[in-house]
Image (cartoon, coloured by chain):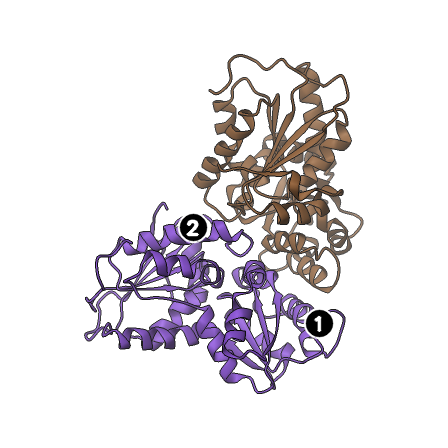
Chain colours: A purple, B brown
Amino acid sequence: MLTNGPVVDSSRAIGVFDSGVGGLTVLRALRDELPREQFIYLGDTARLPYGTKSAETVVRYALQAADALIGRGIKALVVACNTASAAALPSMRERYADLPVIGVVEPGAEAAVIATRSGCIAVIGTEATVRGGAYQRAICRRRPDAVVSAVACQMFVALAEEGWTSGAVARATAQRYLAPLSTPGSGSMPAAVADTLVLGCTHFPMLRSVIREVVGDTVTIVDSAATTARAARAMLSERGLLRLDETAAPMSFLATDGAARFAAIGARFLGCDIDSRAVELIDL
Amino acid sequence: MLTNGPVVDSSRAIGVFDSGVGGLTVLRALRDELPREQFIYLGDTARLPYGTKSAETVVRYALQAADALIGRGIKALVVACNTASAAALPSMRERYADLPVIGVVEPGAEAAVIATRSGCIAVIGTEATVRGGAYQRAICRRRPDAVVSAVACQMFVALAEEGWTSGAVARATAQRYLAPLSTPGSGSMPAAVADTLVLGCTHFPMLRSVIREVVGDTVTIVDSAATTARAARAMLSERGLLRLDETAAPMSFLATDGAARFAAIGARFLGCDIDSRAVELIDL
Protein backbone atom coordinates (compact mmCIF):
# COMPACT_ATOMS: atom_id res chain seq x y z
CA MET A 1 0.00 0.00 0.00
CA LEU A 2 1.67 3.18 -1.19
CA THR A 3 -1.22 5.66 -0.95
CA ASN A 4 -3.02 7.01 2.07
CA GLY A 5 -6.72 7.06 1.35
CA PRO A 6 -8.39 7.79 -1.99
CA VAL A 7 -6.87 10.27 -4.44
CA VAL A 8 -9.06 13.36 -4.64
CA ASP A 9 -6.95 15.99 -6.38
CA SER A 10 -8.22 16.13 -9.97
CA SER A 11 -5.47 18.59 -10.98
CA ARG A 12 -2.82 15.87 -10.72
CA ALA A 13 -1.37 14.15 -13.79
CA ILE A 14 -2.33 10.75 -15.15
CA GLY A 15 0.57 8.29 -15.18
CA VAL A 16 0.98 6.20 -18.32
CA PHE A 17 3.39 3.30 -18.32
CA ASP A 18 4.79 1.02 -21.00
CA SER A 19 7.92 -1.05 -21.54
CA GLY A 20 8.99 1.33 -24.31
CA VAL A 21 7.48 3.51 -27.01
CA GLY A 22 4.48 1.31 -27.93
CA GLY A 23 2.32 2.82 -25.19
CA LEU A 24 2.61 6.18 -26.93
CA THR A 25 -0.19 4.97 -29.25
CA VAL A 26 -2.30 4.76 -26.07
CA LEU A 27 -1.09 8.19 -24.90
CA ARG A 28 -2.12 9.56 -28.29
CA ALA A 29 -5.62 8.13 -27.84
CA LEU A 30 -5.75 9.44 -24.26
CA ARG A 31 -4.79 12.94 -25.44
CA ASP A 32 -7.58 12.83 -28.03
CA GLU A 33 -10.12 11.59 -25.49
CA LEU A 34 -8.98 13.74 -22.54
CA PRO A 35 -7.50 16.94 -24.01
CA ARG A 36 -7.52 18.84 -20.69
CA GLU A 37 -5.51 16.30 -18.75
CA GLN A 38 -1.83 16.28 -17.94
CA PHE A 39 0.14 13.05 -18.58
CA ILE A 40 3.44 11.65 -17.31
CA TYR A 41 4.59 8.86 -19.61
CA LEU A 42 7.21 6.36 -18.47
CA GLY A 43 8.88 4.03 -20.98
CA ASP A 44 11.08 1.34 -19.40
CA THR A 45 13.36 1.41 -22.43
CA ALA A 46 16.37 -0.07 -20.60
CA ARG A 47 14.50 -3.32 -20.01
CA LEU A 48 12.26 -3.64 -23.05
CA PRO A 49 10.88 -5.78 -24.52
CA TYR A 50 8.61 -7.20 -21.83
CA GLY A 51 6.88 -9.37 -24.43
CA THR A 52 9.48 -12.13 -24.37
CA LYS A 53 10.09 -12.13 -20.60
CA SER A 54 8.62 -14.38 -17.92
CA ALA A 55 5.51 -13.29 -16.00
CA GLU A 56 7.42 -12.97 -12.69
CA THR A 57 9.96 -10.61 -14.25
CA VAL A 58 7.23 -8.54 -15.91
CA VAL A 59 5.38 -8.16 -12.59
CA ARG A 60 8.56 -7.06 -10.81
CA TYR A 61 9.46 -4.50 -13.50
CA ALA A 62 5.90 -3.18 -13.76
CA LEU A 63 5.64 -2.58 -10.01
CA GLN A 64 8.96 -0.70 -10.00
CA ALA A 65 7.75 1.50 -12.86
CA ALA A 66 4.40 2.12 -11.19
CA ASP A 67 6.17 3.04 -7.92
CA ALA A 68 8.21 5.65 -9.79
CA LEU A 69 5.09 7.24 -11.31
CA ILE A 70 3.23 7.16 -8.00
CA GLY A 71 6.22 8.87 -6.40
CA ARG A 72 5.50 11.80 -8.74
CA GLY A 73 1.97 12.19 -7.40
CA ILE A 74 -0.35 10.89 -10.09
CA LYS A 75 -4.14 10.63 -9.72
CA ALA A 76 -4.56 7.54 -11.91
CA LEU A 77 -2.40 4.97 -13.68
CA VAL A 78 -2.86 3.65 -17.22
CA VAL A 79 -0.87 0.50 -17.92
CA ALA A 80 -0.40 1.09 -21.65
CA CYS A 81 1.35 -2.22 -22.22
CA ASN A 82 -0.51 -5.41 -23.01
CA THR A 83 2.15 -7.65 -21.52
CA ALA A 84 2.23 -5.73 -18.23
CA SER A 85 -1.57 -5.42 -18.14
CA ALA A 86 -1.94 -9.13 -18.64
CA ALA A 87 0.68 -10.11 -16.07
CA ALA A 88 0.73 -7.38 -13.45
CA LEU A 89 -2.70 -5.74 -13.13
CA PRO A 90 -3.89 -7.87 -10.17
CA SER A 91 -0.63 -7.20 -8.25
CA MET A 92 -0.93 -3.49 -9.00
CA ARG A 93 -4.55 -3.20 -7.86
CA GLU A 94 -3.56 -4.93 -4.63
CA ARG A 95 -0.51 -2.75 -4.05
CA TYR A 96 -2.19 0.55 -4.97
CA ALA A 97 -5.67 -0.11 -3.61
CA ASP A 98 -6.75 3.54 -3.55
CA LEU A 99 -5.39 4.53 -6.95
CA PRO A 100 -7.49 4.04 -10.08
CA VAL A 101 -5.51 1.65 -12.29
CA ILE A 102 -6.58 0.70 -15.78
CA GLY A 103 -4.98 -1.71 -18.25
CA VAL A 104 -5.46 -2.27 -21.96
CA VAL A 105 -6.66 -5.87 -21.86
CA GLU A 106 -10.12 -5.49 -20.29
CA PRO A 107 -11.21 -2.56 -22.52
CA GLY A 108 -9.94 -4.44 -25.60
CA ALA A 109 -11.80 -7.61 -24.62
CA GLU A 110 -14.97 -5.60 -23.94
CA ALA A 111 -14.80 -3.91 -27.35
CA ALA A 112 -14.19 -7.24 -29.09
CA VAL A 113 -17.22 -8.87 -27.47
CA ILE A 114 -19.40 -5.92 -28.50
CA ALA A 115 -18.05 -6.01 -32.06
CA THR A 116 -18.28 -9.72 -32.85
CA ARG A 117 -21.37 -11.20 -34.49
CA SER A 118 -20.14 -14.77 -34.95
CA GLY A 119 -18.40 -15.04 -31.57
CA CYS A 120 -15.15 -15.95 -33.31
CA ILE A 121 -12.45 -13.52 -32.21
CA ALA A 122 -8.76 -13.51 -33.07
CA VAL A 123 -6.22 -11.85 -30.78
CA ILE A 124 -2.72 -10.92 -31.90
CA GLY A 125 -0.05 -9.86 -29.43
CA THR A 126 3.45 -10.52 -28.17
CA GLU A 127 4.59 -14.00 -27.14
CA ALA A 128 4.03 -13.21 -23.45
CA THR A 129 0.53 -11.78 -23.96
CA VAL A 130 -0.59 -14.76 -26.04
CA ARG A 131 1.03 -17.31 -23.73
CA GLY A 132 -0.45 -15.68 -20.62
CA GLY A 133 -3.97 -16.03 -22.05
CA ALA A 134 -5.35 -12.87 -20.39
CA TYR A 135 -7.29 -11.74 -23.49
CA GLN A 136 -8.69 -15.21 -24.01
CA ARG A 137 -9.93 -15.29 -20.39
CA ALA A 138 -11.26 -11.72 -20.44
CA ILE A 139 -13.24 -12.42 -23.62
CA CYS A 140 -14.62 -15.75 -22.39
CA ARG A 141 -15.71 -14.21 -19.07
CA ARG A 142 -17.89 -11.80 -21.05
CA ARG A 143 -19.05 -14.31 -23.66
CA PRO A 144 -18.50 -17.91 -22.56
CA ASP A 145 -19.36 -19.37 -26.00
CA ALA A 146 -16.74 -17.23 -27.79
CA VAL A 147 -14.15 -19.04 -29.90
CA VAL A 148 -10.87 -17.19 -29.39
CA SER A 149 -7.72 -17.86 -31.36
CA ALA A 150 -4.50 -16.09 -30.44
CA VAL A 151 -1.35 -15.63 -32.50
CA ALA A 152 1.96 -14.21 -31.29
CA CYS A 153 3.19 -11.70 -33.89
CA GLN A 154 6.58 -10.79 -32.47
CA MET A 155 7.90 -9.45 -35.79
CA PHE A 156 5.25 -6.71 -35.85
CA VAL A 157 7.02 -5.08 -32.89
CA ALA A 158 10.32 -4.92 -34.78
CA LEU A 159 8.56 -3.62 -37.91
CA ALA A 160 6.81 -0.82 -36.02
CA GLU A 161 10.05 0.25 -34.31
CA GLU A 162 11.97 0.16 -37.60
CA GLY A 163 9.24 2.30 -39.17
CA TRP A 164 8.56 -0.34 -41.83
CA THR A 165 4.80 -0.04 -41.52
CA SER A 166 4.08 -0.47 -45.22
CA GLY A 167 5.88 -2.07 -48.18
CA ALA A 168 6.94 -5.59 -49.10
CA VAL A 169 8.32 -6.71 -45.74
CA ALA A 170 5.32 -5.52 -43.72
CA ARG A 171 2.90 -7.09 -46.21
CA ALA A 172 4.72 -10.45 -46.31
CA THR A 173 4.91 -10.52 -42.51
CA ALA A 174 1.21 -9.74 -42.12
CA GLN A 175 0.36 -12.41 -44.66
CA ARG A 176 2.46 -15.03 -42.90
CA TYR A 177 0.91 -14.33 -39.50
CA LEU A 178 -2.66 -13.49 -40.48
CA ALA A 179 -3.58 -15.37 -43.65
CA PRO A 180 -4.36 -18.55 -41.64
CA LEU A 181 -6.87 -16.54 -39.59
CA SER A 182 -8.94 -15.81 -42.68
CA THR A 183 -8.64 -19.26 -44.27
CA PRO A 184 -11.02 -21.74 -42.63
CA GLY A 185 -9.48 -24.96 -41.36
CA SER A 186 -6.00 -24.43 -42.72
CA GLY A 187 -3.34 -26.38 -40.86
CA SER A 188 -3.36 -25.95 -37.11
CA MET A 189 -5.66 -22.92 -37.22
CA PRO A 190 -9.24 -23.06 -35.98
CA ALA A 191 -11.90 -23.96 -38.53
CA ALA A 192 -13.98 -20.94 -37.55
CA VAL A 193 -13.13 -17.67 -39.28
CA ALA A 194 -12.81 -14.72 -36.92
CA ASP A 195 -14.97 -11.67 -37.67
CA THR A 196 -13.09 -9.56 -35.09
CA LEU A 197 -9.36 -9.02 -34.69
CA VAL A 198 -7.96 -7.53 -31.48
CA LEU A 199 -4.66 -5.65 -31.80
CA GLY A 200 -3.36 -6.89 -28.46
CA CYS A 201 -0.07 -5.00 -28.52
CA THR A 202 0.35 -1.24 -28.45
CA HIS A 203 2.81 -1.41 -31.35
CA PHE A 204 0.29 -2.94 -33.71
CA PRO A 205 -1.88 0.11 -34.47
CA MET A 206 1.16 1.37 -36.41
CA LEU A 207 0.61 -1.53 -38.84
CA ARG A 208 -3.14 -1.13 -39.02
CA SER A 209 -3.38 -0.46 -42.76
CA VAL A 210 -1.25 -3.43 -43.81
CA ILE A 211 -3.19 -5.65 -41.36
CA ARG A 212 -6.45 -4.36 -42.88
CA GLU A 213 -5.13 -5.21 -46.37
CA VAL A 214 -4.52 -8.82 -45.37
CA VAL A 215 -7.61 -9.57 -43.27
CA GLY A 216 -10.01 -7.76 -45.61
CA ASP A 217 -12.89 -5.37 -45.00
CA THR A 218 -15.28 -7.79 -43.32
CA VAL A 219 -13.19 -8.16 -40.16
CA THR A 220 -13.63 -5.57 -37.38
CA ILE A 221 -10.27 -4.43 -36.04
CA VAL A 222 -10.31 -3.56 -32.33
CA ASP A 223 -7.54 -1.20 -31.32
CA SER A 224 -7.16 -1.33 -27.56
CA ALA A 225 -5.60 2.15 -27.46
CA ALA A 226 -8.87 3.87 -28.35
CA THR A 227 -10.99 1.59 -26.16
CA THR A 228 -8.65 2.11 -23.20
CA ALA A 229 -8.84 5.88 -23.57
CA ARG A 230 -12.64 5.72 -23.44
CA ALA A 231 -12.48 3.45 -20.39
CA ALA A 232 -10.06 5.85 -18.69
CA ARG A 233 -12.45 8.77 -19.27
CA ALA A 234 -15.34 6.78 -17.78
CA MET A 235 -13.29 5.77 -14.74
CA LEU A 236 -12.08 9.33 -14.03
CA SER A 237 -15.55 10.73 -14.51
CA GLU A 238 -17.08 8.18 -12.12
CA ARG A 239 -14.56 9.09 -9.41
CA GLY A 240 -14.86 12.86 -9.92
CA LEU A 241 -11.26 13.03 -11.09
CA LEU A 242 -11.66 14.72 -14.49
CA ARG A 243 -9.57 17.87 -14.72
CA LEU A 244 -11.68 21.00 -15.04
CA ASP A 245 -9.15 23.54 -16.34
CA GLU A 246 -6.64 23.21 -19.20
CA THR A 247 -3.04 22.38 -18.37
CA ALA A 248 -0.05 24.38 -19.60
CA ALA A 249 2.27 21.36 -19.85
CA PRO A 250 0.16 18.48 -21.12
CA MET A 251 2.86 15.80 -21.48
CA SER A 252 6.15 14.91 -19.87
CA PHE A 253 8.32 11.89 -20.58
CA LEU A 254 10.49 9.59 -18.49
CA ALA A 255 12.64 6.79 -19.91
CA THR A 256 15.11 4.37 -18.38
CA ASP A 257 17.54 4.50 -21.32
CA GLY A 258 18.23 6.18 -24.67
CA ALA A 259 16.44 9.54 -24.62
CA ALA A 260 17.38 10.28 -28.24
CA ARG A 261 16.04 6.96 -29.53
CA PHE A 262 12.91 7.31 -27.41
CA ALA A 263 12.23 10.74 -28.91
CA ALA A 264 13.01 9.73 -32.49
CA ILE A 265 10.98 6.52 -32.61
CA GLY A 266 8.39 7.71 -30.10
CA ALA A 267 7.40 10.66 -32.29
CA ARG A 268 6.07 8.24 -34.92
CA PHE A 269 3.99 6.42 -32.29
CA LEU A 270 2.71 9.60 -30.63
CA GLY A 271 2.04 11.36 -33.91
CA CYS A 272 3.88 14.53 -32.90
CA ASP A 273 7.44 15.61 -32.16
CA ILE A 274 9.15 14.77 -28.86
CA ASP A 275 12.10 16.93 -27.83
CA SER A 276 14.82 14.51 -26.70
CA ARG A 277 16.09 17.11 -24.18
CA ALA A 278 12.71 16.96 -22.48
CA VAL A 279 12.94 13.17 -21.95
CA GLU A 280 14.13 12.66 -18.38
CA LEU A 281 16.26 9.57 -17.78
CA ILE A 282 15.49 7.71 -14.54
CA ASP A 283 16.71 4.51 -12.87
CA LEU A 284 14.20 1.95 -11.67
CA MET B 1 40.49 -5.95 -10.38
CA LEU B 2 38.71 -9.17 -9.58
CA THR B 3 41.52 -11.67 -10.12
CA ASN B 4 44.71 -12.20 -8.15
CA GLY B 5 47.56 -12.77 -10.55
CA PRO B 6 47.42 -14.55 -13.90
CA VAL B 7 45.12 -17.53 -14.48
CA VAL B 8 47.17 -20.68 -14.91
CA ASP B 9 44.71 -23.51 -14.52
CA SER B 10 44.01 -24.77 -18.04
CA SER B 11 41.36 -27.19 -16.78
CA ARG B 12 38.98 -24.35 -15.99
CA ALA B 13 36.04 -23.47 -18.24
CA ILE B 14 35.89 -20.68 -20.81
CA GLY B 15 33.18 -18.13 -20.07
CA VAL B 16 31.07 -17.00 -23.01
CA PHE B 17 28.75 -14.05 -22.62
CA ASP B 18 26.01 -12.53 -24.76
CA SER B 19 22.87 -10.47 -24.22
CA GLY B 20 20.76 -13.45 -25.24
CA VAL B 21 20.88 -16.42 -27.59
CA GLY B 22 22.80 -14.82 -30.47
CA GLY B 23 26.17 -15.65 -28.91
CA LEU B 24 25.32 -19.32 -29.20
CA THR B 25 26.46 -19.07 -32.85
CA VAL B 26 29.86 -18.12 -31.40
CA LEU B 27 29.71 -20.95 -28.85
CA ARG B 28 28.98 -23.33 -31.73
CA ALA B 29 32.10 -22.11 -33.55
CA LEU B 30 34.14 -22.32 -30.32
CA ARG B 31 33.01 -25.93 -29.80
CA ASP B 32 34.09 -26.79 -33.34
CA GLU B 33 37.45 -25.06 -32.92
CA LEU B 34 38.14 -26.18 -29.33
CA PRO B 35 36.38 -29.54 -28.87
CA ARG B 36 38.23 -30.40 -25.64
CA GLU B 37 37.25 -27.25 -23.77
CA GLN B 38 34.51 -26.71 -21.25
CA PHE B 39 32.23 -23.69 -21.69
CA ILE B 40 29.90 -21.72 -19.40
CA TYR B 41 27.53 -19.63 -21.47
CA LEU B 42 25.64 -16.71 -19.94
CA GLY B 43 22.75 -15.07 -21.81
CA ASP B 44 21.44 -11.89 -20.19
CA THR B 45 17.96 -12.65 -21.49
CA ALA B 46 16.17 -10.49 -18.90
CA ARG B 47 17.80 -7.36 -20.29
CA LEU B 48 18.17 -8.10 -23.99
CA PRO B 49 18.46 -6.58 -26.50
CA TYR B 50 21.65 -4.63 -25.87
CA GLY B 51 21.65 -3.43 -29.50
CA THR B 52 19.21 -0.59 -28.91
CA LYS B 53 20.59 0.54 -25.54
CA SER B 54 23.03 3.35 -24.73
CA ALA B 55 26.75 2.63 -24.43
CA GLU B 56 26.79 3.42 -20.67
CA THR B 57 24.03 0.91 -19.99
CA VAL B 58 25.70 -1.76 -22.13
CA VAL B 59 28.99 -1.30 -20.25
CA ARG B 60 27.25 -1.61 -16.88
CA TYR B 61 25.33 -4.75 -17.89
CA ALA B 62 28.37 -6.37 -19.51
CA LEU B 63 30.54 -5.88 -16.42
CA GLN B 64 27.84 -7.41 -14.20
CA ALA B 65 27.62 -10.43 -16.50
CA ALA B 66 31.40 -10.80 -16.65
CA ASP B 67 31.60 -10.60 -12.84
CA ALA B 68 29.11 -13.47 -12.59
CA LEU B 69 31.16 -15.67 -14.93
CA ILE B 70 34.42 -14.79 -13.21
CA GLY B 71 32.78 -15.73 -9.91
CA ARG B 72 32.49 -19.24 -11.33
CA GLY B 73 36.23 -19.51 -11.90
CA ILE B 74 36.76 -19.21 -15.65
CA LYS B 75 40.17 -19.15 -17.32
CA ALA B 76 39.18 -16.86 -20.21
CA LEU B 77 36.20 -14.75 -21.29
CA VAL B 78 34.72 -14.55 -24.78
CA VAL B 79 32.38 -11.60 -25.25
CA ALA B 80 30.14 -13.20 -27.87
CA CYS B 81 28.10 -10.06 -28.42
CA ASN B 82 29.04 -7.38 -30.92
CA THR B 83 27.31 -4.62 -28.99
CA ALA B 84 29.06 -5.50 -25.72
CA SER B 85 32.40 -6.07 -27.47
CA ALA B 86 32.16 -2.68 -29.14
CA ALA B 87 31.12 -0.81 -26.00
CA ALA B 88 32.63 -2.65 -23.05
CA LEU B 89 35.88 -4.39 -24.04
CA PRO B 90 38.22 -1.61 -22.85
CA SER B 91 36.43 -1.44 -19.45
CA MET B 92 36.60 -5.22 -19.15
CA ARG B 93 40.31 -5.43 -19.95
CA GLU B 94 40.96 -2.79 -17.34
CA ARG B 95 38.80 -4.48 -14.70
CA TYR B 96 40.07 -8.02 -15.33
CA ALA B 97 43.68 -7.26 -16.17
CA ASP B 98 44.93 -10.82 -15.64
CA LEU B 99 42.14 -12.63 -17.44
CA PRO B 100 42.33 -13.22 -21.19
CA VAL B 101 39.31 -11.41 -22.66
CA ILE B 102 38.38 -11.60 -26.33
CA GLY B 103 35.59 -9.89 -28.21
CA VAL B 104 34.07 -10.46 -31.64
CA VAL B 105 34.85 -7.09 -33.22
CA GLU B 106 38.64 -7.27 -33.57
CA PRO B 107 38.71 -10.79 -35.08
CA GLY B 108 35.91 -9.79 -37.50
CA ALA B 109 37.74 -6.63 -38.55
CA GLU B 110 40.97 -8.59 -39.01
CA ALA B 111 39.25 -11.18 -41.22
CA ALA B 112 37.57 -8.45 -43.29
CA VAL B 113 40.86 -6.67 -43.99
CA ILE B 114 42.46 -9.95 -45.06
CA ALA B 115 39.48 -10.79 -47.30
CA THR B 116 38.99 -7.50 -49.14
CA ARG B 117 40.66 -6.78 -52.44
CA SER B 118 39.10 -3.41 -53.25
CA GLY B 119 39.31 -2.05 -49.69
CA CYS B 120 35.55 -1.44 -49.73
CA ILE B 121 33.98 -3.22 -46.76
CA ALA B 122 30.37 -3.21 -45.59
CA VAL B 123 29.49 -3.94 -41.98
CA ILE B 124 25.98 -4.87 -40.86
CA GLY B 125 25.03 -4.96 -37.19
CA THR B 126 22.60 -3.69 -34.59
CA GLU B 127 21.86 0.02 -34.18
CA ALA B 128 24.27 0.29 -31.23
CA THR B 129 27.14 -1.50 -33.01
CA VAL B 130 26.80 0.65 -36.11
CA ARG B 131 26.36 3.90 -34.15
CA GLY B 132 29.33 3.11 -31.89
CA GLY B 133 31.62 2.76 -34.93
CA ALA B 134 33.90 0.11 -33.37
CA TYR B 135 34.10 -2.00 -36.55
CA GLN B 136 34.75 1.05 -38.68
CA ARG B 137 37.63 2.07 -36.37
CA ALA B 138 39.05 -1.46 -36.04
CA ILE B 139 39.09 -1.86 -39.85
CA CYS B 140 40.63 1.57 -40.50
CA ARG B 141 43.36 0.97 -37.90
CA ARG B 142 44.44 -2.06 -39.93
CA ARG B 143 43.92 -0.52 -43.36
CA PRO B 144 43.71 3.27 -43.24
CA ASP B 145 42.57 3.61 -46.87
CA ALA B 146 39.59 1.26 -46.39
CA VAL B 147 36.16 2.57 -47.33
CA VAL B 148 33.76 1.20 -44.73
CA SER B 149 29.99 1.51 -44.94
CA ALA B 150 27.83 0.34 -42.05
CA VAL B 151 24.13 -0.44 -42.02
CA ALA B 152 22.00 -1.19 -38.96
CA CYS B 153 19.85 -4.24 -39.72
CA GLN B 154 17.72 -4.43 -36.59
CA MET B 155 15.02 -6.56 -38.24
CA PHE B 156 17.49 -9.40 -38.83
CA VAL B 157 17.60 -9.96 -35.07
CA ALA B 158 13.82 -10.40 -34.88
CA LEU B 159 13.85 -12.69 -37.95
CA ALA B 160 16.55 -14.94 -36.48
CA GLU B 161 14.71 -15.22 -33.15
CA GLU B 162 11.39 -15.92 -34.87
CA GLY B 163 13.11 -18.64 -36.91
CA TRP B 164 12.14 -16.95 -40.18
CA THR B 165 15.56 -17.44 -41.74
CA SER B 166 14.25 -18.14 -45.24
CA GLY B 167 11.09 -17.34 -47.19
CA ALA B 168 9.41 -14.17 -48.44
CA VAL B 169 9.84 -12.02 -45.31
CA ALA B 170 13.54 -12.81 -44.83
CA ARG B 171 14.23 -12.22 -48.54
CA ALA B 172 12.33 -8.90 -48.68
CA THR B 173 14.10 -7.72 -45.51
CA ALA B 174 17.54 -8.64 -46.83
CA GLN B 175 16.77 -6.90 -50.11
CA ARG B 176 15.64 -3.73 -48.36
CA TYR B 177 18.75 -3.55 -46.19
CA LEU B 178 21.39 -4.91 -48.54
CA ALA B 179 20.42 -4.09 -52.12
CA PRO B 180 21.85 -0.55 -51.81
CA LEU B 181 25.21 -2.07 -50.83
CA SER B 182 25.49 -3.80 -54.20
CA THR B 183 24.10 -0.92 -56.31
CA PRO B 184 26.73 1.75 -56.85
CA GLY B 185 25.77 5.30 -55.96
CA SER B 186 22.13 4.67 -55.15
CA GLY B 187 20.62 7.25 -52.82
CA SER B 188 22.57 7.89 -49.65
CA MET B 189 24.73 4.80 -50.07
CA PRO B 190 28.42 5.01 -50.91
CA ALA B 191 29.35 4.95 -54.58
CA ALA B 192 31.93 2.21 -53.99
CA VAL B 193 30.65 -1.37 -54.06
CA ALA B 194 31.81 -3.47 -51.13
CA ASP B 195 33.54 -6.77 -51.95
CA THR B 196 33.39 -7.91 -48.30
CA LEU B 197 30.44 -8.01 -45.93
CA VAL B 198 30.98 -8.40 -42.17
CA LEU B 199 28.13 -10.02 -40.24
CA GLY B 200 28.61 -7.77 -37.23
CA CYS B 201 25.90 -9.33 -35.06
CA THR B 202 25.89 -12.87 -33.72
CA HIS B 203 22.29 -13.36 -34.89
CA PHE B 204 23.15 -12.77 -38.51
CA PRO B 205 24.88 -16.09 -39.35
CA MET B 206 21.38 -17.59 -39.03
CA LEU B 207 20.40 -15.57 -42.12
CA ARG B 208 23.55 -16.29 -44.05
CA SER B 209 21.92 -18.04 -47.00
CA VAL B 210 19.33 -15.33 -47.65
CA ILE B 211 22.05 -12.68 -47.27
CA ARG B 212 24.17 -14.59 -49.79
CA GLU B 213 21.22 -14.69 -52.20
CA VAL B 214 20.89 -10.91 -52.12
CA VAL B 215 24.55 -9.84 -52.19
CA GLY B 216 25.58 -12.41 -54.79
CA ASP B 217 28.56 -14.74 -55.06
CA THR B 218 31.25 -12.13 -55.60
CA VAL B 219 31.03 -10.71 -52.07
CA THR B 220 33.04 -12.40 -49.28
CA ILE B 221 30.92 -12.86 -46.18
CA VAL B 222 32.90 -12.61 -42.92
CA ASP B 223 31.21 -14.35 -40.03
CA SER B 224 32.78 -13.10 -36.81
CA ALA B 225 31.79 -16.28 -34.92
CA ALA B 226 34.29 -18.43 -36.82
CA THR B 227 37.02 -15.79 -36.76
CA THR B 228 36.54 -15.24 -33.02
CA ALA B 229 36.85 -18.97 -32.34
CA ARG B 230 40.15 -19.07 -34.19
CA ALA B 231 41.38 -16.00 -32.29
CA ALA B 232 40.36 -17.63 -28.99
CA ARG B 233 42.36 -20.75 -29.83
CA ALA B 234 45.43 -18.63 -30.65
CA MET B 235 45.11 -16.65 -27.41
CA LEU B 236 44.73 -19.75 -25.21
CA SER B 237 47.59 -21.49 -26.96
CA GLU B 238 49.88 -18.49 -26.51
CA ARG B 239 49.17 -18.38 -22.78
CA GLY B 240 49.47 -22.13 -22.27
CA LEU B 241 45.79 -22.38 -21.36
CA LEU B 242 44.57 -24.99 -23.85
CA ARG B 243 42.92 -27.90 -22.09
CA LEU B 244 44.82 -31.14 -22.50
CA ASP B 245 42.21 -33.75 -21.57
CA GLU B 246 38.61 -34.07 -22.74
CA THR B 247 35.85 -32.77 -20.48
CA ALA B 248 32.83 -34.80 -19.41
CA ALA B 249 30.44 -31.82 -19.28
CA PRO B 250 31.39 -29.59 -22.19
CA MET B 251 28.66 -26.92 -21.90
CA SER B 252 26.57 -25.36 -19.17
CA PHE B 253 24.08 -22.53 -19.53
CA LEU B 254 23.08 -19.56 -17.40
CA ALA B 255 20.30 -17.12 -18.27
CA THR B 256 18.73 -14.18 -16.48
CA ASP B 257 15.18 -14.96 -17.61
CA GLY B 258 13.03 -17.46 -19.49
CA ALA B 259 14.88 -20.79 -19.38
CA ALA B 260 12.31 -22.47 -21.64
CA ARG B 261 12.52 -19.79 -24.33
CA PHE B 262 16.32 -19.76 -24.07
CA ALA B 263 16.43 -23.51 -24.64
CA ALA B 264 13.87 -23.52 -27.47
CA ILE B 265 15.28 -20.65 -29.51
CA GLY B 266 18.87 -21.27 -28.44
CA ALA B 267 18.86 -24.79 -29.86
CA ARG B 268 18.48 -23.34 -33.37
CA PHE B 269 21.44 -21.01 -32.81
CA LEU B 270 23.65 -23.66 -31.19
CA GLY B 271 22.72 -26.35 -33.71
CA CYS B 272 21.90 -28.93 -31.05
CA ASP B 273 19.30 -29.47 -28.33
CA ILE B 274 19.41 -27.59 -25.02
CA ASP B 275 17.58 -29.12 -22.08
CA SER B 276 15.62 -26.26 -20.48
CA ARG B 277 15.99 -27.92 -17.05
CA ALA B 278 19.75 -27.56 -17.42
CA VAL B 279 19.52 -23.79 -17.94
CA GLU B 280 20.27 -22.18 -14.58
CA LEU B 281 18.48 -18.88 -13.91
CA ILE B 282 20.63 -16.24 -12.20
CA ASP B 283 20.16 -12.61 -11.12
CA LEU B 284 22.71 -10.01 -12.16
Q: Which residue is mark 1?
A: A189
Task: Please identify the quarter of the rendering in which residue A26 is found.
Answer: bottom left
> Is A125 placed above or below A226 here?
above
Furthest residue to the right?
Answer: B217
Q: Which residue is mark 2?
A: A61
Question: Which amino acid, by three-letter code, is at mark 1?
Answer: Met
Q: Are marks 2 and 1 in contact (CB under 8 Å)?
A: no
Question: Which amino acid, by three-letter code, is at mark 2?
Answer: Tyr
Which percent across, then down, holds residue B85?
A: 56, 35
Which percent across, then down, holds residue A35?
A: 29, 75
Out of B256 and A113, give the one closest to the viewer. A113
Q: Is residue A271 visible?
A: no
Q: Earlier in the sequence, mark 2 or mark 1?
A: 2
Q: Chain of mark 1?
A: A
Q: Is residue A76 visible?
A: yes
> Is B35 placed above or below A51 here?
above
**Which numbered dot is residue B127?**
none
Which percent across, then down, holds residue B19?
A: 56, 41
